[in-house]
Image (spheres, grey):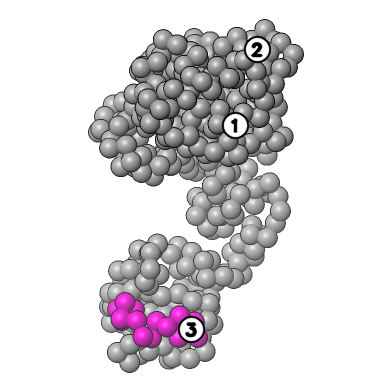
Amino acid sequence: MNEVFLQYAWQHKIYHPELVSSEGQTIEVIHPGIKNTDGGPDFFNAKIKIDGTLWAGNVEIHQNADEWYQHQHHTDAAYNNVILHVVKQSSKETLNSNNRKIPVCELKINDNIRQKYQQLYFNDQWIACEHAIKNVSSFELNQWLDRLLIERLESKSQLINELLKSTKNDWDQIFFILLSRSFGFGINGLPFEMMARQTPLNILLKHTNSLFQLEALLFGQAGFLTTPKYEDEYTLELQKEYNFLKAKYQLSSIEQHLWKFLRLRPVNFPTVRIAQLAHLIYLTKGSFDQLLLVKEKFSSFNKLIISTSDYWLSHYQLGHLSKKVSTKILGKQSQHRIIYNTIVPYLFIYTAKHKQEDQKEKIIDYLYQQPTEKNKTIDKWAEIGIVSESEANAQALIHLKNNYCDHKKCLNCHIGFQVLCKM
């Protein structure tokens, strides 16, 4: 039983209610306090009766009372307002830096709950609660999924806040960076983002009438034209054009070695994705407004046939000839991933920061109106009895798996709470 579980038990009061200090004082918890996620005591502003006297202050939790001294809390004034030291096992008295004795209380947790926690934490199923989640009520599950949807939409806020600083609040440049990152589809997301950060959108906008120049700029900024792995006439023409534009705009590229090709299908090579991004910018003339209309349900995006220049019909890499195909369009599944993983979260954060509450609601409603886009994760959820009824549910379930289940954060999950304490 680790310290995290002790904190959880204290926070949710899942312990034997008859608490007594190591010196025989009766302890009644009026309020366990507010969990502290930064440095200092584990819980702030607790209210506790000790032998009938009400105390207000902080609570520190350890597995063993000795840890108070191992962590040097007895020399730290930040712990002088601790009114109770909660432990699994008491071995010695606790003194603060003023040499004041702090009551020590052993927490006795129900054996059934402790066993459930161990079963969750140590099993190797696809999700820890696979054996029990079907018994969680649909009301509790849907409430949690609603919260997780908002959490997922807000998950890009940290990156956007950083981009707001680096771009001096240029929302168009931020969208270009996020859109570019989405064309990496995970494995090449970071180099796409790095390329876009190095490429001012206003420069691309000057060349939206020429797909060739857009390709020269993007492939050059991606590092593919510095020392091409293969060379042909088109590659050399791109290189010549990029060198001219690079000097004109004083651009600098990222390193070519950052891009990943290994174990990717050729159609997913970053070179093909860069060509498709160039084509999208060419089609929209760099005006992304038509991609961002929630009221149109992104129909304008869906109507765009995002393909490549003719060169890429017979190439997957620059200078390397391959069998010619009729088209290399961006598929519907890829378009939907860009919409749900990039455009929707961007709009949600944009409307939140601009206090456009009605637009925020439209974005959320849109997700609840869309059918679920099938993928391996959603199919696996269905196998264990959790069927996604909308794209909103699907996004929440993906977030649950990636950010809670995969990291065994059962103690931070409402479903985990239901399994531990209610079932």
The crowd level at tag 1 (other Cα within 10 Å; few <14, some 14-19, many 20+) is: few
Q: Secondary structure at mark 2?
A: helix
Q: Residue furthest right?
A: 323
Q: Which residues are magenta?
A: 66-82
Placement of 333 over or under 115, stated as above or below: above
Placement of 341 over or under 10, stated as above or below: above
Q: Which marked residue is nearer to the observer: mark 1 or mark 3? A: 1
The crowd level at tag 2 (other Cα within 10 Å; few <14, some 14-19, many 20+) is: some
Of the residues shown, which amino acid type is indicated by label 2? Answer: Leu
User: Is residue 181 found inside the magenta-colored segment of the image?
Assistant: no
Q: Is residue 118 left or right of residue 389?
A: right
State the count of labels.
3
State how far apart marks 2 and 1 are (Cα). Answer: 23 Å
User: Is residue 80 found inside the magenta-colored segment of the image?
Assistant: yes
Q: Is residue 355 left or right of residue 8?
A: left
230 or 260, which lies in front? 230
Q: Position of residue 351 (x, y in %)?
A: 30, 30
Of the residues shown, which amino acid type is indicated by label 3? Answer: Gln
State how far apart marks 1 and 3 are (Cα). Answer: 56 Å
Q: Which quadrant does the C terminus fall into? A: bottom right
* Residue under the image location 43 percent in, 27 percent down: 246
The residue pinned by badge 1 equals: 227
Q: Secondary structure at mark 1?
A: loop
> Quadrant of the rendered structure where residue 376 is?
top right
The residue pinned by badge 2 equals: 313
* Residue under the image location 28 percent in, 26 percent down: 358
Q: Secondary structure at mark 3?
A: helix
The residue pinned by badge 3 equals: 70
* Residue under the image location 28 percent in, 74 percent down: 56
Q: Are marks 2 and 1 in contact (CB under 8 Å)?
A: no
